[in-house]
Image: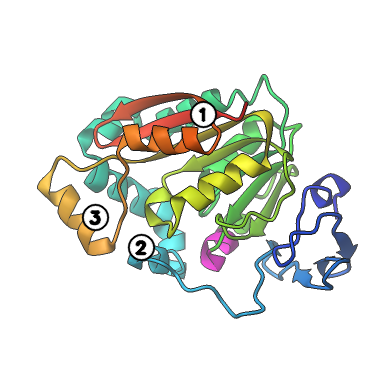
């Protein structure tokens, strides 16, 4: 296993750093938990001692579907954004290419040192683009969905600087201050405890590290409100989100709004 990647890891069970490489994955020398590198090609860093975690929402359960993982990039995500964010989102960003441009430039990947985390990476659409933008840096795609990770691994051929990890955004399997930036596109709405995830992001960023995310504001359209209610989707008031990040220690908050969606950036001082 790449020593650079190994040095970032933290045990999902006891929080110990200094993981040891094993033939089939990694192990914690403190609590003896082992974490397997699966046949699908990703490292499973979830603590499964109490069994598989339960999906907190209907949408998260759908993310475990192999069918959804296959159609996510081309059909599911674009349709989902149009319904929940309205026409203003796609028009304002210029579609995925424009959204990626904003995320990548907000992270300042060409000017700053990684490693970089693509949090809740899904089938790896942003992960691959980040890898192409920073070919000399380590890019980590993390998701809790096995179906999404299997799809991501199958599509990442040609990028030697990418690793995929199965993990929980509420308990990130990385040491304190180990990452240069976190990309977090369009998944907060499905989280069980967003403030806990933000606290974890703050913990793993090194001083000066950037956090760039995107999510949905309160809906203006009836269809958007109805869809969110039916799927159990959380929406975020931008002013309250800014206040919560500030309370957790983030600074220099900025945002750009497109319809009922917005992209934000904050820095760990």
Counting labels gives 3
- Label ID, residue 59: 2
Residue drawn where x is 41% and y is 64% of the image: 60
Which residue of the protein is positioned furthest toward the front in this rendering?
Answer: 247
Foreground pick, 195 / 187:
195
Residue 87, image x and y in percent? Answer: 21, 35
Q: How far apart in space, not on screen, are marks 3 and 2 (Cα)?
A: 10 Å
Q: Residue at x 34, y 67 (%)?
A: 58
Residue 260 visible in rendering: yes
Q: Is residue 148 magenta?
A: yes
Residue 184 vertical placement versus 110 (above, below): below
- Residue in the image at 53% along x and 39% along y: 248
Helix, strand or loop at mark 1:
strand
Mark toward the start of the polypeptide (3 vs 2): 2
Q: Residues within 10 Å of mark 1 (few under 14, many from 20)?
A: many
Q: Which residue occupies the foreground of this view, 222 or 269?
A: 269
10 Å neighbourhood of mark 3: few (<14), some, or many (≥20)?
A: many
Question: What are the residue bounds of the magenta stretch?
Answer: 145-151
Residue, disc 3: 228
Q: Earlier in the sequence, mark 2 or mark 1?
A: 2
SS class, disc 3: helix
Q: Are marks 2 and 1 in contact (CB under 8 Å)?
A: no
């Amino acid at each position: 296993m790449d020593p650079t990647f190994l040095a970032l890891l933290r045990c999902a069970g006891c929080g110990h750093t200094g993981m040891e490489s094993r033939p089939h994955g990694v192990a914690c020398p403190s609590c003896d938990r082992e974490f397997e590198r699966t046949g699908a090609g990703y490292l499973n860093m979830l603590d499964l001692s109490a069994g598989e975690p339960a999906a907190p929402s209907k949408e998260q359960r759908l993310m475990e579907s192999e069918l959804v993982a296959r159609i996510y990039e081309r059909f599911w995500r674009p349709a989902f954004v149009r319904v929940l964010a309205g026409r203003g989102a796609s028009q304002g960003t210029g579609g995925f290419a424009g959204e990626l441009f904003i995320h990548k430039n907000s992270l300042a990947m060409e000017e700053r040192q990684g490693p970089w985390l693509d949090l809740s990476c899904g089938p790896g659409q942003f992960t691959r683009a980040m890898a192409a933008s920073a070919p000399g840096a380590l890019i980590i795609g993390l998701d809790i969905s096995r179906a999404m990770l299997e799809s991501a691994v199958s599509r990442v051929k040609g990028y030697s600087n990418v690793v995929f990890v199965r993990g929980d955004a509420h308990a990130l399997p990385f040491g304190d201050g180990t990452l240069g930036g976190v990309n977090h596109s369009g998944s907060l709405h499905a989280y069980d405890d967003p403030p806990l995830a933000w606290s974890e992001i703050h913990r793993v960023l090194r001083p000066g590290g950037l956090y760039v995310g995107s999510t949905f504001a309160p809906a203006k359209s009836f269809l958007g409100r109805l869809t969110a209610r039916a799927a159990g989707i959380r929406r975020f008031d931008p002013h309250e989100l800014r206040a919560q990040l500030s309370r957790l220690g983030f600074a220099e908050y900025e945002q750009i709004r497109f319809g009922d969606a917005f992209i934000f950036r904050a820095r760990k001082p």
